[in-house]
Image: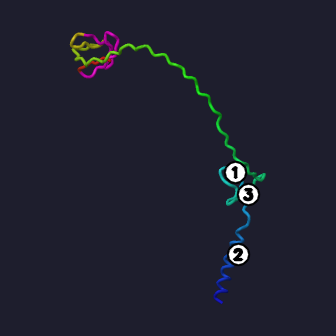
Amino acid sequence: MLLAGGHARAQEQAAPAESLTEPLPVCQLDPRDSGKLAVEPCRPAPPVQPRRSVAQVIGRMPAQPASPVVPIAPLPPSPAVPMPRAPQPIGSCDSGGCRDAAGARYNGAGNATLDANGRICHRNGAFMQCF
């Protein structure tokens, strides 16, 4: 009798689960809020046409002809770039620029100036270096 009673309880528990397996409605968007579903849970809509299998064909890329080798003419020699000189100590400065200890003039205001040859010079404290 115990076995029969246990089997009856299992059928009672299965009955509510069977009543919940009604088909779910097809998913549709809420007309007031398109970011939500109208009814949840829902099932996806059935396909309009049945899908058919198609063999996937992967073809080879066509062979590319090798590009012709074009000889490159050598570049003309570039002029020698002078190396920066060693920093020179500054003797005195005025509103138009500075003079170094040897008397060379650096025109400009602030830390960026130009020497007599037009090179950019940078003042760093008591020294001037041109590049």
Quadrant of res 21: bottom right
Of labels 1 and 3, the one closer to you: 3
Pointer 1 or 3: first along the chain:
3
Pick whichever, 88 or 93, lies toward us. 88
Q: Residue at x 69, y 51 (%)?
A: 32
Left or right of 127, for residue 70: right
Q: Amino acid at mark 3?
A: Val
Rounded to the nearest whole Å, what is the CA distance between mark 2 and mark 3?
25 Å
Image mark count: 3
N-term-proximal mark, 2 vs 1: 2
Q: Are marks 2 and 3 in contact (CB under 8 Å)?
A: no
Residue closest to the far right: 49
Q: Position of residue 89 (x, y in %)?
A: 22, 17
In the image, what residue occupies the spot 24% across and 20% down?
127
Please give left or right for residue 16 compared with residue 121 in the image.
right
Q: What kind of element bears circle 1?
A: loop
Query: Who's the residue at 74% across and 55% down the image?
Result: 45
Give the residue number, with chain letter if any, for mark 1.
Answer: 32
Disc 2 designates what residue?
15
Q: Which residue is mark 3?
A: 26
Going 35% across and 11% down the picture, which residue do you hit? Answer: 118
Give the magenta-colored segment's residue range: 104-125
